[in-house]
Every structure is written in structure tokens, then in C-alpha cells.
Image (cartoon, grey):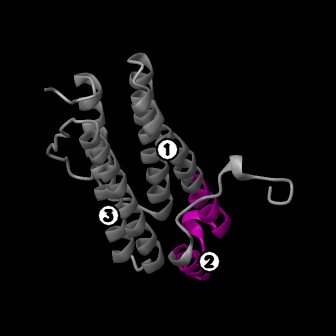
Amino acid sequence: MNTNRLSPRLEQALSDQMNTEDLQSRVYFSYGIWAADKGYGGISNFLFRHAQEERDHAVKFMQYVLNRGGKPKITALPAPGQEPQSLTDCFDLVFKHEVDNTTAIYNLVNIAFEEKDWASWNFLQWFVKEQIEEETFAMNLIDKLKIAGGDRASDESLFTLDKTLETLPDDAEQAQDATGANP
């Protein structure tokens, strides 16, 4: 008896996203290595933690496909790409990766909606919310670097930024959690 509750199209799309999340993990890992090589220990620590978070997302997709009776397919991953040329470039690339990932998640949501696969649609809502957080966090990185002076920041400003990111929580506050007392 076939117990797969996913259409072939959605199963493939979810597997593709699992592999995309794994690639994102490698991208963040490579950016962390770049930052460590440049002496930004706090920034590299932050990026390494983010790499693990992306890997955890891949595992969520894998587990979901398995739980729905499907079989996720692991594919070969391309190299992460060129390393950043500066901190501004690094943080801009982080933002771009998150926007691209949001687009991919929205495409999955559309497929689930078209197929009226409400279980998958519901599963994907977690990722929709997560991408709001991820994009907000990436924008905050860009803002923090701009405040520090961008690529012309003083050594002292970069040192402070590096130390701040080393201990910064991995979660951004979400707009829907705002209240009058906590805007």
C-alpha cells in the first residue's frame, strides 16, 4: 500500500528545499571561515551558529517528507561561491541569500495551496515566519555595520561590532510580537 501523502511535485520541491537549506548552511559556514580569517572572531561565531540553524532547517524538511511517507532525495551541492570582499559585501550577501530563500519558501507555499495539501501548507507557515525573522536579522546586520561606519569604520567600531555579534542572540524580534509596552 502506498502511504505517501505528498504529490510527486511537492515531494520533489520539498526535497529541493532541503538541499537548498543544506547549501545555505555551507554558504554561511564559508562566510564564517572568511570572517575568522580576517580576524572577526565574533562575526565568524555568529555566522557559524547561523550555518547550524540552516542545517537544522534542512533536517526539518527531511523529517517532514519522511513523516508524510515520502523519501527526500539528497543531491550534489555546488560550491558556496566566492567569498565576500568586505564586511559590507558579506552582510549584503547574507541579506540576498535570505531574500532568495524567502522566494523559495513562498513557491513551496504556492504549490501546497494549489494542491490543497493543507498539512504541507501548515508545515510551511513556520518557515514563512522564520523568513520574516531571517530577513529582519540580515537587515539589522547591515544597519549595525552602517552605524559603525561601513567599510570605513574605525578599528574600534569594528572591534565593538565583532564583540556584539559574538554574543548577539540568534533570534530577531518579530513585528507581530510588538506591544505598546514593547514596540
Is the magenta region chiefly helix, strand or loop? helix
First reached walking from the N terminus: tag 3 or tag 1? 3
**Quadrant housing the N terminus:** top left
Determine the residue located farthest toward the top in the rendered image.
Answer: 114
**Picture coordinates of residue 127 (x, y %)?**
47, 43
Q: Disc 2 to disc 3, how far (Cα)?
A: 24 Å
**Mark 3 or mark 1, which is nearer to you?**
1
Residue type pointed to by label 2: Ser
Q: Which residue is tagged 2?
A: 157
**Mark 2 or mark 3, which is nearer to you?**
3
Q: Are marks 1 and 2 in contact (CB under 8 Å)?
A: no
Q: Are marks 2 and 3 in contact (CB under 8 Å)?
A: no
Residues in magenta? 139-165
Residue type pointed to by label 3: Phe
**Mark 1 or mark 2, which is nearer to you?**
1
Q: Residues within 10 Å of mark 1 (few under 14, many from 20)?
A: few
| Residue 129 sits in quarter | top right
Q: Which residue is tagged 3?
A: 29
Q: Which residue is tagged 1?
A: 126
First reached walking from the N terminus: tag 2 or tag 3? 3
